[in-house]
Image (cartoon, rainbow, N blue to C red):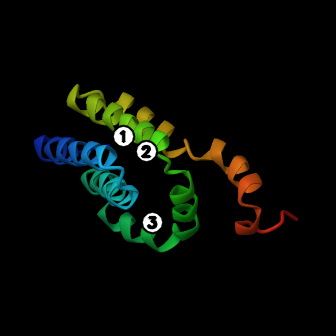
Amino acid sequence: MKKNGPSLIAHLRENIAAQQNALDSTDPAAFHALDEEFHRLVCEHAGHEHVWGLIQDHKAHLDRVRYLTLSQEHRARVRGEHHEILSALEAGDLTLAEQNLRTHLTGIKPHLENLRRKHAAYFEERV
């Protein structure tokens, strides 16, 4: 991450507060939209505005997985991970912020095999 000024931190604080409201109201669609916004904000403030469009074009399959894994418990964990990223940015620790972000982004991997077993019809057979 390159830019972590007051604007980013203020936007992320607002976003995480709204994520908590979505958790409290048990509104998965609202939470998912706020999750998207969180990632867009981080991407844009990191100086990669052009990448967000590319990500949007290629993540349809990942979105399906995200929808299947966004239980109330998982949404709370995601919100916590977002808060850890924000805390590192607030402290000015860009190395920790990047580490937290990488951990967060790879957090979906352990759920894939479980989803494959639970929702086999949604997956193609491995060759």
Picture quarter with the N terminus: top left
Calculate the distance from the C-alpha at mark 1 to the C-alpha at mark 3.
21 Å
Q: Nearer the viewer, mark 1 or mark 3?
A: 1
- Identify which amino acid the numbered label 2 is placed on: Arg
Residue that mark 3 sits on: 55
Dot 1: element: helix
Disc ID at residue 103 = none
- Identify which amino acid the numbered label 1 is placed on: Arg
Q: Nearer the viewer, mark 2 or mark 3?
A: 2
* Residue 61 drawn at (x, y percent): 58, 67
- Identify which amino acid the numbered label 3 is placed on: Ile
Residue that mark 1 sits on: 79
Calculate the distance from the C-alpha at mark 1 to the C-alpha at mark 2.
6 Å
Residue at 45 percent across and 44 percent down: it is 72
Dot 3: element: helix
How many residues crowd mark 3 within 10 Å: few (<14), some (14–19), many (20+)? few
Disc ID at residue 75 = 2
Closer to the N terminus: mark 2 or mark 3?
3
